[in-house]
Image (tube, coloured by chain):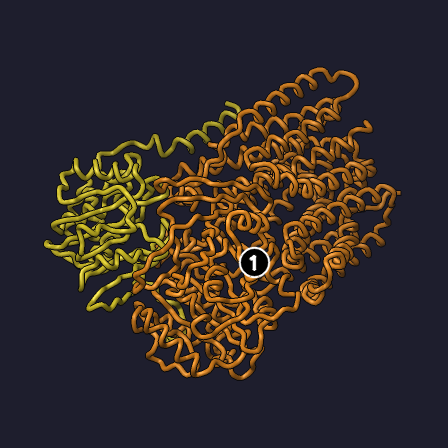
Chain colours: A orange, B yellow
Amino acid sequence: MNRRLPWAVGFLSAGMIAFQLSLMQILSICQWSHFAYMVISVAMLGLGTSGTVLFFLKKKLLGRTELYVPALMILTSVSMVTILFFSGRVFGGFDSYLVFYEKRHYADLLLTYFVLFIPFFLGASALGLLYIRYASGIGKLYFADLTGSGLAGLLMLFLFWHFSPERLPVIIACFPLLAGILAIPAKGGRVIAGLGLIAGSLLLAGTMYPVKLPLSQYKSLSRTLLLPGARIMEKVNSPYGHLTRVQAKSLRYAPGLSLTYSGSVPVQEVLFNNGDWLGPVVAFDTSATDHFLDHATYALPFITGDPGSVFIAGAAAGLYADHAWVHGVQEIIAAQTNKAAVELLYRNSVIPEPSVHFVGIHPRTFLLSGSRYDLIILPETGSFGGSAGIHALEEQFLFTTQAFSQMWDCLTPDGMISATVWMDFPSRNSLKLLATLVQIAESKAPGSPAEHIMAVRSWATVTFVLKKSRITSREITKLMEFSRREQFDPLLYPGMGPSAGDHYNSLQDDSFFVAIERIMSPSVERKAFFKEYDFNIRPATDSKPYFSQFLKLNRLSKMRDVFGDASVPFLETGYLIVLVTFLQITAAALLFILLPLFLIKKPGRKKASPLVYFAAIGVGYMFVEMVFIRQYTVYFGDPLYAASAVLSAMLFFSGAGAFVSRKVVFENRRFGILMLFITGLLVILAAGLTPLLNSTAGFPLWLKLLLSFVITGPLSFLMGMMFPSGIRALSLQKKDDLIPWAWGVNGAFSVISTVLATILAVEFGFSIVMLVGAVAYFTAGQAVRFRLFSIFVS
Amino acid sequence: MNILSRITGFFLIFLLGPAIEPVMTQDYALMRDRMVREQIIGRGVTHRATLQAMRKVERHLFVDASLRKRAYDDNPLPIGFGQTISQPFIVAYMTSLIDPQPHFKVLEIGTGSGYQAAILAQITDSVYTIEIVPELGLKAKKLLHDLHYDNVEVITGDGYYGLPGKGPFDAIVVTAAAEHVPPPLIEQLKDGGKMIIPVGSPFMVQSLVLVTRKKGRIRTENLMSVRFVPFTRKENE
């Protein structure tokens, strides 16, 4: 083996992972973040399909591996840059809103799939060819593959800060080009070197002529830029997203303002993240005595209380901090994970320190410091006019029962948690939020949950307040006065009569009030209501942190009857797109990977049985990886960096496992026991990971990182041994025919698993995903135990 | 024919399918009549003037030529600039809710395609409509002029301040709803006047907020665009 080949593999893998991350960001900007699933699936499909192609062309390709491998690597680089040149067609050809409306957009979406698939297919073909050619020494190559992938994750954190999204693919394309150059053989590589020169010229052209990314016309940023005089004032690159600060003389934001308000609403600059609305950039006007939010339901905690310290969880661009500051609050801490947004605020606003302080950290992590607050304000949920469910699969760890429990513990004795929600029809957000508050009040103040919750409703919003001590009659009086003055309707307060809720803002029928009443009922009745209601309004948990996911799949036919086929996709686009992606990708995997292999050369039942092993480890690895990434999101103060570190560590440890596997000769029975050991570990983690992370969340960062490496490291090490051991065994048993099969089947099942894991997490939670991962490894172990596949090579 | 050319052939047919569909001579009047019967009357809208206007206004002229044959379908359609022409039923329902009379002076915020303004212009004496996106405003202005809707005045600009010089208005239709109702618009609503605000994402109006102003008191009513009855035990009892 050429000594430079492991390096080439490392660079190629790094390029492919980096390209995947870059595409995810570009699609988040041009469309919406749920297209990240599409990118992952397309990448995995590229991997799987390469196995099929290698199966057919193996004889032809193996003869000249030393030439084909660098050529494929360079072509990977070329295809990455070429995609960018056609970005208008690739990223802006289809529109996720119009996909449900016009056939043309569906065709464009398919075209996008196909174009994005090419670089992954070419890169994976180079890898697969090397694995077949050097099957007995696969450990070293697989180590380079995984280590390159792991390092790419870390490298991208740096690149995201320093390069704009449209420039990144050109930089990333240098990696496969470098890989190709490294792999060029000493003899007969002139043609390949020429190809490299062409690729280099393309890269240069890509650098000199940067393209403009096409945003969907339905993105908030697109619509804002249509306003007269709208100007982009600043753009900030960051791994947290691409920030855009926009100024326009008609930009005003006053969510759910009372219709009696006759004052002015200031013109504000607005911040967008990946083209989505983040919030107005506030000025902290020192002369202000009144705030327009005093005329919205948001003011409820300030009307009924007089907080001296406020914690804002999810600071956005500072609106709620400004509101608290106008009320003279002496200590305001505003936290959010987007560090780039915090830095931008400090650059553009005169923050009245030390009264107001913004921090770039996950709010739940900040609360671990042990400080107590009189008021905790949560960001509003839902959106005006509905978000068409595009956030359905966003993990909202701030709105889980564990989060509310933690916030309750951080309140002073008379402290309050305030959360505002947009009214939606049919009611979903408000009911789920109330269900969460009731559950917390019930567990923290047994016997009298209703004594701790109050709420007012306007024409557009509801603000709920959960108070640690019992709500007093004085506070109720203030709530009533406030409601009368602003023409809001009291929705909840202790001792509220049945007719008080519909005075100024009436609803079409009483179903909303019936739902509120049933949620406020004792636990058994409440749970029965959750089951009966057409939408999922059970409180979110850390294991199922999808607060904005409401769709119940078994009620889809009713939704179609009521809303019509054309409208249903807009009830919950985010989840439906993932379901559609799952169906598409499963069909594509069957069509492009499994079917050709079956049709052309049936391997025979016995001969094909090793494939059970490769399918199972494909499913297992992806499921475990998915749970680890999600579960570490809240654990660290900076989820992005920490999750990247954990993921990179996981890949690195797996790579180390692959490297060591070269020297290990397994005996079937012992291998089965090892698989059982992995299964056991996964079962323990399924039950214990969340409690373990919760109980150690307060540890110092270095200790948490260490603990996370202890949890993920050995497991990843063992899991990393499985694939190369299997390939090596096939090679040494002279079953070379099956190697492309194994590569393809492993890829196909990994494809399906990436999306399936998300669907299972939504429906059943992360613990179940981990358990399915455990079952997959158990199956692989059993396949070996029952000699479907012998890993033992004497 | 090899497999590759067959695949390419199928792919091209799929891509070009919508474009090469034979163009039929559509009887738009018949389609309009069916739209009113099935989509509007069928869903309970009985406001006579609204139904007449919906029968008369040629909706297909307000959409892009490529979408004309779908103009009378039961759904909204894209008109560019991130905006849509609303579903016929929503236009009818909104119009009926403000109960327009011939002598009414109506203000519309968000002209869009100009279709809603045309419907209102069929019923009332004067319609003022403001569009913030210049391209849309100019296009709608030309179209409404060409169709001889002389009682519609299209203004291109920021609708936030309404039209103080032309008010007060008997009704205000805020089709380009913001997350707050601009205070100047409330001030320009006549006593006894009505304002209607559709709430929803571009392709799915989920509810309508009807604002009424009477003797200084402002009331709102949230109405769902479709009759959705939650499935609960109480419902079944």
Disc 1 crowd, CA 10 A, few/some/many (<14, 14-19, 20+): few
Question: Number of numbered discs present?
Answer: 1
Q: Residue at x 13, y 51 (%)?
A: B124
Which of these two is toward me, B73 or B136? Answer: B136
Left or right of B123 in this view: A203: right
Q: Residue furthest right?
A: A794
Q: Position of residue A166 (x, y in %)?
A: 54, 34
Q: Residue at x 43, y 83 (%)?
A: A473
Residue B199, by quadrant, is bottom left
Task: Note whether residue A578 is visible.
Answer: yes
State the quadrant of the C terminus of chain A.
top right
Q: Residue at x 34, y 30 (%)?
A: B20
Q: Position of residue A667 (x, y in %)?
A: 86, 49
Q: Residue at x 42, y 73 (%)?
A: A516
The residue that label 1 is drawn on is: A353
State the quadrant of the N terminus of chain A.
top right
Determine whether A527 is above or below A767 in the image: below
Which of these two is toward me, A422 or A138? Answer: A422
Which kind of residue does numbered mark 1 sit on? Answer: Glu
Task: Note whether residue A545 is visible.
Answer: no
